[in-house]
Amino acid sequence: MAMLLLIPLFLSSIALFTIASATTFSTHPGICYGQLGDNLPPPQKSVSLITSLHAKRVKLYDANPAILHALRDTSLQVSIMVPNDLIVNISRNQSLSDKWVSDNVVPYHPRTLIRYLLVGNEVTSSTAPNGTWPYLVPAMRRIKHSLKSLGIRKVKVGTSSAIDVLEASFPPSNGAFRKDLSAPVMKPMLKFLNRTKSFFFLDVYPFFSWSADPLNINLDYALFQSKNLTVTDPGTGLVYTNLFDQMVDAVYFAMNRLGFPGVRIFIAETGWPNGGDLDQIGANIFNAATYNRNFIKKVTRKPWLGTPARPGSALPSFLFALFNENQKPGPGTERHFGLLHPNGSRVYDVDLSGETPEAGFRPLPVPENNEKFKGEIWCVAARPHNATALAAALAYACSQGNGTCDPIQPKGKCFKPDSVFWHASYAFSAYWAQFRKVGGTCYFNGLATQTAKDPSK
């Protein structure tokens, strides 16, 4: 009963927020500009490409001077970031905070429209105790004080959080922050965001939720394509037509649970991979284009749609990402979230303004991996390769696990052909077979690739 009484108060407070913010935002999505690639265009060219996508904002994962200089005298609003490894020191030292802002904001502001300053990236994502957590909000306070003391008042300070800050998310009205974060981190953070009228910056990826449970989560529901499927929250009666809204509303309810129903959410990252490894279901161009185009339609629609728990509210956002970045570690999807190839060509047609009709886009390739891959997969050395780097990766793989490389030792049954390439292929597959289920990947700094062809034949 207490929860039912809270819900009308929650929704009425949001109605007041919606009216107050009606002229605050452009809802055209921005773009996340990552730099983990060795083949990306220079900043000036990248800024031109961002403009060609009709983006209104750009998010950086640092405060890269060349990029900030290239963004001068453009209309793009900019988000910059304090790196995770500086958070502890900044939280303890106001002078260091002042210096960071003096070095990374003052030289560019106001000609570069820095509007958001994120202190760290997904700092709270690890479920293990993390030594940085207690220092996150104090660092945010330091940075805000530095901005104010230097006369910079139009920059919102926050930090980006992944959806795993929640311990409960379904139904959305059960949304609650993890117990290890709720009191020591989230409550003081929300107090800071509320006081400074900033945002809760949230990374939302329906792809990962769907791909982890494709039998029980409908793909069309994850892609904003569901026509007849709806989900009703039994606690509120709110009706959901897509997975994204479910995920966002779970965070709204979690914030409400801590007494902060009026803090606004800013989608710091969302997107869908256009490719991936053989064993990564649904990572393809068709799904990526469908998700991103439908997301753009949702957030640019007038009047604003909001979410079932915050109807009619603006939802500012950044799409992830500008480029496919070939040096991102992890599974193949990590290197395939870009709207653009590194040469600047489009992976698929997209218009961040939402003004191009579907008929104005070129046809998409038919998806071929919307069901789990059936068959064996091997992890082998990729060609071409750097022999020195490959030898180091071979040594690493052989040092992991129990007897991983015994068969490729001299006189072993797989010793021949005696070459670093073939030994690495064996070692990578043996390593991956042992550690795949606990997060091991077939990557090895770009030296490995998956194949459905048995390398022994």
Image (tube, grey):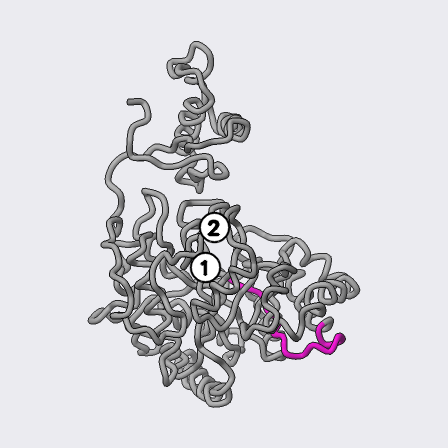
Whether residue 36 is visible to the viewer of this picture, yes or no, is yes
Q: In this view, does 411 lie to the left or right of 360?
A: right
Q: Is residue 100 above or below residue 431?
A: below
Residue at image x 28%, y 59%? Answer: 217
**Label at residue 228:** none
Label 2 crowd (10 A; few <14 / some 14-19 / many >=20): many
Q: In which quarter of the image is the N terminus?
A: bottom left
Identify residue for label 1.
321
Q: Is residue 165 above or below residue 228?
A: above
Report which quarter residue 79 is drawn in.
bottom right
Identify residue for label 2.
325
Q: In this view, does 98 lie to the left or right of 28?
A: right
The residue nearer to you, when weighing 111 against 367, is 111
Q: In this view, does 77 lie above or below 64?
A: below
Label 1 crowd (10 A; few <14 / some 14-19 / many >=20): many
| Label pair 2/1, CB-CB below 8 angstroms | yes
Residue at image x 35%, y 78%? Answer: 236
SS label for mark 1 = loop
In space, the residues marked 2 and 1 are separated at their CA atoms by: 9 Å
Q: Where is residue 30 in the image (x, y as percent from the top left)?
A: 47, 69
Is residue 155 shown in magenta? yes
Label 1 is placed on what type of residue?
Ala
Whether residue 404 is visible to the viewer of this picture, yes or no, is no
Q: Quadrant of the C terminus?
A: top left
Please state the extent of the stretch shown in magenta in the rendering: 147-161
Q: Where is residue 74 in the image (x, y as percent from the top left)?
A: 56, 72
Residue at image x 69%, y 77%? Answer: 152
Label 2 is placed on what type of residue?
Glu
Residue at image x 48%, y 68%? Answer: 51
